[in-house]
Image (cartoon, coloured by chain):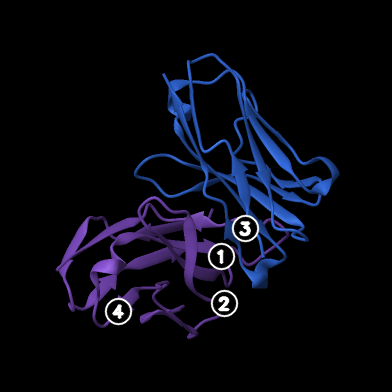
Amino acid sequence: GNSVTQMEGPVTLSEEAFLTINCTYTATGYPSLFWYVQYPGEGLQLLLKATKADDKGSNKGFEATYRKETTSFHLEKGSVQVSDSAVYFCALIGSGGGADGLTFGKGTHLIIQP
Amino acid sequence: EAGVAQSPRYKIIEKRQSVAFWCNPISGHATLYWYQQILGQGPKLLIQFQNNGVVDDSQLPKDRFSAERLKGVDSTLKIQPAKLEDSAVYLCASSSGRAAGYTFGSGTRLTVV
């Protein structure tokens, strides 16, 4: 079946540091890949997505590139802010059939210190 | 547009009691999902509806969980009887199609004591 593995947290960085959160996946065919963010006390929000190999998703200064050869979708940001503190989830949807529920990783808690 | 509405926001029950959660998706969204998010884990899909039909319920513990989506709009998720390990946030999401993305509600936090 499909699965997503992402780096364990919490990840603690100083403001303006470079961020990488690793995500790898297992799926047949060509899944669609997503990053969701959950700010404290709020619901899940889509951060970015990529639907085919070599696509780059980007939003709010965050980027992730769909790498088929390494089955990865690492999240990066060049300069983090305190407001980026949240839990980040990598997720995928499999490529076949009508069942298209998301498969999530366990989440990475990001803490940005001023 | 209005978001995905869920109620209640919080619920505390004793084990072996029953509980029900309600979800109203975004108007026009044919697909509705229920997820269970246990503390410290990612959400896990419980059931997917397309209009009022079930597409995927392979991870729904059918001995105690049930869900319905009458008339293809609102949905309810029920647990009977509840166990301690059912303590989690129950998330509802809706979509108008795979390419359009998914919108999540704020969830119902269930505590079973």
**Pointer 3: what residue?**
B3
SS at mark 2 in the image: loop
SS at mark 1 in the image: loop
SS at mark 4 in the image: strand
**For the residues marked 1 and 4, what is the alpha-carbon distance in whole angstroms?**
29 Å
**For the residues marked 2 and 4, what is the alpha-carbon distance in whole angstroms?**
20 Å
Q: Chain of mark 2?
A: A
Q: Chain of mark 3?
A: B
Local crowd size for mark 2, using a 10 Å CA cut-off: few (<14), some (14–19), many (≥20): some
Circles 2 and 1 in contact, beta carbons < 8 Å: no
**For the residues marked 2 and 3, what is the alpha-carbon distance in whole angstroms?**
24 Å
**Pointer 4: what residue?**
A77
* Residue at 30% across, 79% down: A77
Front residue of B13/B56: it is: B13
Front residue of B63/A17: it is: A17
Q: Amino acid at mark 2?
A: Thr
Q: Chain of mark 4?
A: A
- The number of discs equals 4
Front residue of B73/A19: it is: B73
Residue ranking furthest to the right:
B71
Judge whether A106 appears above or below B100 on screen.
above
Q: Amino acid at mark 4?
A: Lys
Q: Is label 4 on the same chain as label 3?
A: no
Chain identifier, colour purple: A
* Residue B91 at x, y percent in the picture: 55, 46
**Pointer 2: what residue?**
A51
**Pointer 1: what residue?**
A28
Which callout, 2 or 4, points to the residue nearer the camera? Answer: 4
Q: Is residue B15 left or right of residue B22?
A: left
Judge whether B22 appears above or below A39 on screen.
above
